[in-house]
């Protein structure tokens, strides 16, 4: 498939697009989303969805990165509309930290068809970066993500306005914090959030693409491929 890069956006366009997905990956996997999430994103594109995947390296200011991603996605959509004419509003898709960045978008989730949140993760900085907990006290500084985990949940419950959300959890995912996200979403006056449980672990959305990119098609785990296929079908139905 023909991936094209526009700034921080990696874009994959089917011949006849019927919709679009704005994707943010998790942690350092997101530096090369066209590789790390190749199977999932290319399967979605095969279903007629334009893929806009934001490439980034995580920093401490998650609010700023969420804003930057939102502006980059908006610019990419304008270019798509100039070429193809009006398209449906995008579905937002996030994995791990990418879910948090989608939830912190400055429009509060209004300008999209909904959010699919895979393996929501909202750890403190010293857990996400183990050495930080040892180094920061020695330097006499306190370092935490902005917004902090507790502030993130407060912002979601008060300012996130998208009613339609799908929270996806994987059975062996020890990093998943979806329960805290569900609690925050349920505090809002209007909430239409669904939950989907699938087999797998925290890296299931990414690992099939990684294995294929590094080792070739023969290295795909059939069980993971089946989970990705199920996930693709669900995401496509949500974008319809």
Image (cartoon, grey):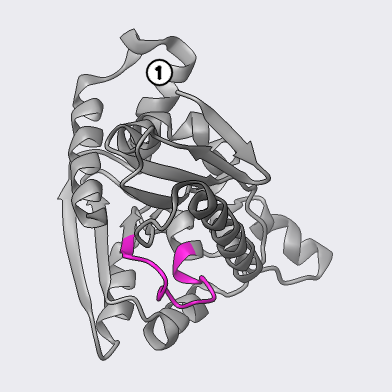
Evaluate whether residue 233 shows in this view: yes
- Magenta stretch encompasses residue 173: no
Looking at this view, name the residue that lies furthest to the right: 139
Give the residue number, with chain letter if any, for mark 1. Answer: 212
Q: In the rendered view, would you say 96 is above or below 17?
A: below
Location of residue 218 by image quarter: top left
Q: Quadrant of the C terminus?
A: bottom left
Q: Which residues are magenta?
A: 102-115
Which residue: 46% across, 64% down? 102
| Residue 122 visible here | no
In this orientation, which residue lies closer to the viewer: 156 or 133?
A: 156
Q: Quadrant of residue 139?
A: bottom right
Magenta stretch secondary structure, dominant = loop
Residue 195 picture location, percent across and down: 18, 61
Q: Residue at x 28, y 87 (%)?
A: 187
Neighbours of disc 1 within 10 Å: few (<14), some (14-19), many (20+): some
| Relative side of 139 to 71, left or right | right
Q: Judging from the image, what secondary structure is the residue with disc 1 in?
A: helix
Residue 105 shown in magenta: yes
Measured as percent of width and height from the top left, residue 117 is found at 34, 58
């Amino acid at each position: 498939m023909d991936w094209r890069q526009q700034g921080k956006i990696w874009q994959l366009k089917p011949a006849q697009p019927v919709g679009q997905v704005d994707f943010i990956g998790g942690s350092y996997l997101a530096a090369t989303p066209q590789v790390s999430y190749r199977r999932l994103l290319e399967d979605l594109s095969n279903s007629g969805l334009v893929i806009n995947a934001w490439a980034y390296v995580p920093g401490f200011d998650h609010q700023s990165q969420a804003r930057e991603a939102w502006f980059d996605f908006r610019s990419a959509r304008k270019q798509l509309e100039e070429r193809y004419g009006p398209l449906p509003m995008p579905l937002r898709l996030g994995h791990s930290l990418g879910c948090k960045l989608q939830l912190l978008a400055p429009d509060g989730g209004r300008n999209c068809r909904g959010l699919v949140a895979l393996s929501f993760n909202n750890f403190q900085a010293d857990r996400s970066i183990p050495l930080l907990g040892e180094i920061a006290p020695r330097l006499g500084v306190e370092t935490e993500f902005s917004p902090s985990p507790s502030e993130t949940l407060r912002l979601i419950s008060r300012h996130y306005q998208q009613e339609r959300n799908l929270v996806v959890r994987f059975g062996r995912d020890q990093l998943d914090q979806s329960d805290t996200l569900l609690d925050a979403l349920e505090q809002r006056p209007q909430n239409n959030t669904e939950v989907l449980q699938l087999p797998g672990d925290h890296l299931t959305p990414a690992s099939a693409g990684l294995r294929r990119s590094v080792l070739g098609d023969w290295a795909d785990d059939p069980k993971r491929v089946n989970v990705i296929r199920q996930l693709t079908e669900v995401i496509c139905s949500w974008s319809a």
